[in-house]
Amino acid sequence: MKKTICMLLVCLLTFSILFVGCKKDPPVTPTTESTENGAQDPAGNVTEDQPKTDPTLSEEDLKKCFAVVITVEGRGQIASSEISKKLVFDVENPTEEIRLNVFDTARYTIAAKPYEGAKFVKWLKNGEDYSTDSAITMQFTEDTRLIAVFEDE
């Protein structure tokens, strides 16, 4: 029970901040007038210049939210993106861990790239061999831990 509540809170918080997996634009609270440092809402409170969003999710939405952790074992980097977006490896700041909260409707491309002198071996999904392809496409239906395994050449 505690794990479920914890997971729901993590999903709600992440969704409210990032709107990961959302296909629609979030609702925007209108502002009535601008000030030097922001805007005033209809109640007269000064707010930031950014529009406010409604982080409310239904219980059904929360059941479709999953935690995904992607890490590296060995010498290499990883990248992920929603299937509709371009996958990019950050050359200056290589990524060795990614944490996502995803909805079951979202599909992701996840890729691994070895550092010089290393080679990609396989993906592990929840501790089990999953794929030997360095780039995979996934739609998550449960909390998942992926590990990109690299070894020296």
Image: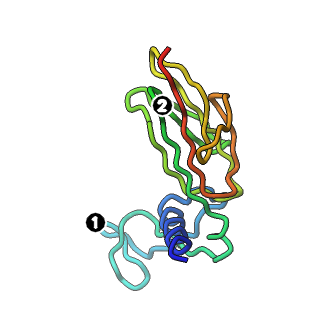
Give the Cα separation between the discs numbered 1 and 2.
44 Å
Per the image, label 2 sits on a secondary structure element best described as: strand
Q: Is residue 128 above or below residue 35?
A: above
- In the rendered image, the vertical position of residue 151 relative to residue 73, given as above or below: above
Instruction: Please state the horizontal and vertical placement of residue 147, each as a whole percent of the image.
Output: 54, 39
Q: Characterize the local packing of mark 1: few (<14), some (14-19) or many (20 or more) Cα atoms within 10 angstroms.
A: few
Q: Which residue is under mark 2?
A: 77
Horizontally, is 89 left or right of 63 in the view?
A: left
- Residue 126 in percent (x, y) is at 60, 48
Q: Nearer the viewer, residue 114 or 23?
A: 114
* Of pointers 1 and 2, the one earlier in the residue sequence: 1
Query: Which element type, helix, strand or loop, lies under badge 1?
Result: loop
Label 2 CA crowd tier, 10 Å (few <14, some 14–19, many 20+): many
- Hey, which residue is sitting farthest bottom in the picture? 43
Q: Residue at x 64, y 31 (%)?
A: 135
Relative to 93, residue 55 above or below: below
Name the residue that disc number 1 marks: 36
**Image quarter of residue 32:** bottom left
Which colour style is shown? rainbow
